[in-house]
Image (cartoon, rainbow, N blue to C red):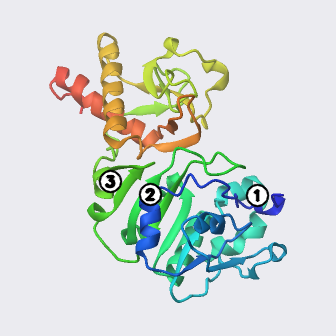
Amino acid sequence: MINDKKRYLGQFYTKETSWLKPQIANFIKSSNCSIIYDPFAGCGDIFHSMEKLGYSNFVGLDIDKNLGWKYNDSLIKIPHIKDAIIITNPPYLSNYSATRKKVYDKVEKYFKMSDYCDLYLIALEKMLEAQTFVVAILPETFINSNFKHKDKLSNLTVLEENPFLDTDSPVLVACFDGVKKSFKDILIYKNNVLINNLEYFENLRLLPSKKIDMIFNDINGWLAVRCVDSTNPNDVLRFDFKDNIKYDWDKNIKASSRLLTLISVDVPDNRKNEFIIECNKILNELREKTSDIILSPFKGNAKNGKRRRRLDFKTCRAIIEMAYSNIVNKISGGKNE
């Protein structure tokens, strides 16, 4: 039975072995470590997965004394063990979520001692302080995080199949070998397929210049944007005219809206359709070139099994700026810059 305390503190149990892709299994074996070490052992599901790879020497720690492991608060410090590789699924809980769930007082001490805003990043730093080799199942948003030791990664694997029974949180598996390296030497996989290296994806990020005036979540805006893929594979991220997206705009558009938005941006009426086409072209090219990986994941998959994605406002703004430059400025001879 899943411990309610661990659930609301962000600890989800890994019940499936779908996360153990060939490249991850190869990394574990190539570490030449003889001990599988889980400082957030929970129900011991990681160890069951490792038995299938032939391992039998396990060390587990946990903060819950009722689970039978040696007690340790691994968000404070993780003891070093010789010849061990950490393989774990650390707790996921942001300071924002802790406040919303009214449990911030239970985790406040961890956030106060760290610059990170999520427990999994705090946990990951403690793991890398303890051991050279680390394999961690993390939220997929790790790719876009400010974690300062990404240069110690060997590879990242984005998973579309959910390895959890109690959450549909999008995840990846991060393999660290402790060696600092260029991002071009860090490999990115999607499921079993090698996509490219981390440098490739970082170079494709779109950053806005904020030189063009636009207002998001403006009820009077003419440019509508679906910012989250629906479960229908045919109803995905897109720019469109307000009337072409069935939605109760008057009732639902608020300053906090993030799923759909209306944007005010000055585009001549006779160029708006062309402008929308250009926005969608830029968006779709970005999705194709990056295999969707630099767009933030959204909980649950579409009906075709593909991970749903979210278009953040910063990337959305950058796309609009590019389309504006390609369409409006080109026609006006650059006078709108």
The local secondary structure at tag 3 comes to helix
Residue 8 place in picture, x, y as percent: 77, 57
Q: Residue at x 39, y 52 (%)?
A: 189
Viewport quadrant of the N terminus: bottom right
Distance between mark 3 and mark 1 Cα atoms: 33 Å
Q: Quadrant of residue 27?
A: bottom left
First in residue order: circle 3 vs circle 1: 1
Near-viewer residue (165 or 51) = 51
The local secondary structure at tag 1 comes to helix
Q: Name the amino acid type tagged 2.
A: Pro
Q: Name the amino acid type tagged 1.
A: Arg
Cβ atoms at labels 2 and 3 below 8 Å apart: no
Cβ atoms at labels 3 and 1 below 8 Å apart: no
Q: Residue under circle 3?
A: 202
Q: Quadrant of residue 137?
A: bottom right
Distance between mark 1 and mark 2 Cα atoms: 29 Å
Which-is-in-front pick, marks 3 and 1? Answer: 1
Q: Residue under circle 2?
A: 22
Q: Residue under circle 1?
A: 7
First in residue order: circle 1 vs circle 2: 1
Q: Name the amino acid type tagged 3.
A: Glu
Q: Residue at x 70, y 75 (%)?
A: 109
Q: Characterize the local packing of mark 2: few (<14), some (14-19) or many (20 or more) Cα atoms within 10 angstroms.
A: few
